[in-house]
Image (cartoon, rainbow, N blue to C red):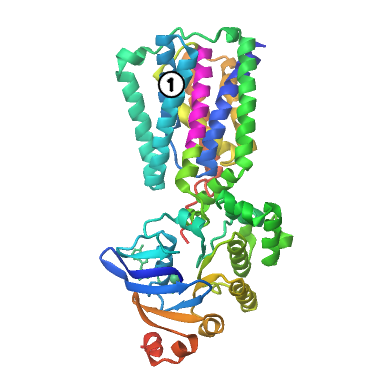
Amino acid sequence: MSFFLHILILIGYCLPIVLAFNLIFGKGKILHFGPMGVSAATSYAIFVVLMNTHSFLLAILFGLLISILISLFFSWLSLRLEQDSLGVMSLAVHLTIIVIITNWTSVTCGALGIPKIPRLSFMESIEMFALVTTIYCAIFLYFLYKVDKSSFGRKLEALAEHSWHAKSLGINRAYVHAIAFLILGFAHVFGGFFAYTYLRFLNTHEFGFQSLIFIVMAVVAGKPGSFKGVTLAVILLILLKEGIRFIPLAPGILGPVRLITFGIILFVAVWIRRDTLFPQERLV
Amino acid sequence: MSLLSLFSVSLTLNNHTILNDVSFDVAQGEVIGLIGPNGSGKTTLFNLLSGFLKPTSGSILFKDENITNVIPSKRARLGFGRVFQHFGIFRDMTLEENVRVALEALPRDKRKELGNMDELVDATLDMALLKPYAKKKAGSLSGGQMRLLEIARTLTSGKELFLLDEPTAGVSPKMTHQVADMISKLKQQGKTVLIIEHDLPFIAQICDRVIVLDVGKVVLSGNPTEVRDSEELKEIYFG
Ligand SMILES: Nc1ncnc2c1ncn2[C@@H]1O[C@H](COP(=O)(O)OP(=O)(O)OP(=O)(O)O)[C@@H](O)[C@H]1O
Ligand SMILES: [Mg+2]
C-alpha cells in the first residue's frame, strides 16, 4: 500500500513538470535543456526561506518570484539564440546555477544539503500527502490539457513549424515563449515544494543530469508534443524506476542498473524517433 | 491619401546592396504588380514591408504612421497580410487549425468585429473550395490548394494590405484561374494588393499599376500596357 502511495506522490509532482516541459520542448520544439536549473533555483529559494522564516506562504511566494525571473531569462535566451546555441547555453546556465548553489554555503549549506525539512501539518501522513499531491496533479493536468488545446497551443505549434509564417499572422513570439516558460516555472515551484517536503531533504544531487535525462526521456519516449503519450510515458517510467528496487540486487549495483536501463530506453526512443525528433524549422 | 509609402528605402547585407533607394506610394484600394528578374530584390522588399528585415536607411509609412521599426507580428495586427512564395501554410496542422490560428492571432476587438469564429473558419474553407478536407493535415494539399487556402485565410482575417509573393508559382494551370478569381475578389472588396509575379499577362489583366525592380532599384513604373510595351522592360529581361 505504501509503495502505491509513494508512486502516486512521485507521479503527482513529476507529471506536471514533464508535461509543462513537453509544452516547450515537444510542442514548441524549443531546445531547452535547463529545466533542472530552474528547478534547483526555485527549490532552493523555497526551502532557504522556509528554514529561515518557518513561513510556508513566504517560501512559496519567494519561490514563485525566483521562478518568474529565471523563466523569463530562459525565455529571453530562446528568442535571442539559434536552437543549437540555446541547447548548449541552457545546459551552461543549469551548471552555473548548481555551482552557485553548491558554493554559496552560508545560505544553501552547499554539498551538505538542507535536512529536516518540515511538512505542512495536514500533510504529515503519507495518505494525506498522496491525496493532496494527487489533487494538485489533477488540477494542473486539467489546466495543461486546456492550454494544449487552446489558441496558445496552436500559436506555439505554428511558431515551431515556421516562425516567419506565424509572425506574419500576428503571433508575438516573445509573448508566447514567455508564457510557456512561466508555466514550466510554476510547475517547478509546486513540484519542488511537494518533492522536498516529501523527502524532507534537499540536496544539489537532485538536480543532476540524471534528472534532466529522465524528463527528456519521458517526452521523447511519449512522443514530443503529445499530451497523452507523455503522460503515459511518465507513469510507466516512474513505475519502472521505482520497481527496479524490488529486483534483489546489491545496493551498490541498483543505481548503475537504473542508469543503464534508462540510457537504453532513451537510446531506443531517440532511435525510433530520429526522423521526427527535431525536424529543422522550415526555412522556405 | 496613400495607405503605404516608402521613402528612399535601402538595404545592405554583408556589404551587398540588395535594395537601393526604393520609393513609391500605394493608394488605398490599388492593385500593384511588382516585377523584375530573379534576384532583383522583390521578395526582400516584401520582407522589409513585413518587418523581417530593417532597412539600412529610409523609412516606411503605413496610414501616415512610421512603422520602420515595428516588429512583424505588430504589423500583421495593423493589417499587413503576407502570402509567401513558398506557401505560408502550417503543414503539420489541419486545414481548420490553419485558419483558426490566423484568426486567433488577431487583436481581440478585431476578432469580435469579424464575427463568430466557427462560421469564419467554415466560410474561409468554403472560399478556398476546401471545406470537405477541414480535418485533413495541410501537408497533404496541392500547391494550388495551399495558395487558395492562404489567400482566403488572409482575406477572412480582415487584413487590409495584401503582399502576395508569386501567387501562381507552384500552382497548376487549372488552379491558376481560381487563384486569379480570388485576387479579383480582393480587388472587388477594395483591398490594397501588392503582387510579385513573373507572368506578365496575368499582371496586365489584374493590376492598376506596375513597378519594375532591377538590381534593387525601381527602374520603371506605370500602367500595365505602357510597361509591357516599353523598350526598357525588354532590355531588363532580355539584355
Ligand atoms: N539574408 C540575405 N543575405 C544576403 N543576401 C541576400 C539575403 N536575402 C536575399 N539576398 C540576396 O538578395 C537578392 C535579392 O533576393 P530576392 O529573394 O529578394 O529576389 P527576388 O526578386 O525575390 O527573386 P525571385 O524572382 O527569384 O524570387 C539576391 O541576390 C539574394 O541572393
Ligand atoms: Mg522572390
Residue B155 seen in the current view: yes
Q: Quadrant of ligand 2?
A: bottom left
Corner quadrant of residue B220: bottom left
Query: Local crowd at mark 1 within 10 Å, few (<14), some, or many (≥20)?
Result: many
A4 versus B28 height, above or below: above
- On screen, residue A82 versus residue A223, left or right, reads left
B49 versus A213 height, above or below: below
The segment highlighted magenta reads: A181-199
Q: Main secondary structure of the magenta part?
A: helix
Q: Residue at x 51, y 71 (%)?
A: B28
> How many numbered discs?
1
- Residue B12 in picture, x, y percent from top left: 29, 65
Corner quadrant of residue B2: bottom left
Q: Nearer the viewer, residue A253 or B140?
A: B140
Residue lying furthest left: B15
A109 versus A37 height, above or below: above
Q: Residue at x 45, y 22 (%)?
A: A63
Q: Nearer the viewer, residue A149 or B206?
A: B206
Q: Nearer the viewer, residue B18 or A16?
A: B18
Corner quadrant of residue A52: top left
- Label 1: which secondary element: helix
- Residue A27 in picture, x, y percent from top left: 55, 43
- Residue B76 in picture, x, y percent from top left: 50, 57
Q: Which residue is mark 1?
A: A62
- Residue A264 in picture, x, y percent from top left: 52, 33
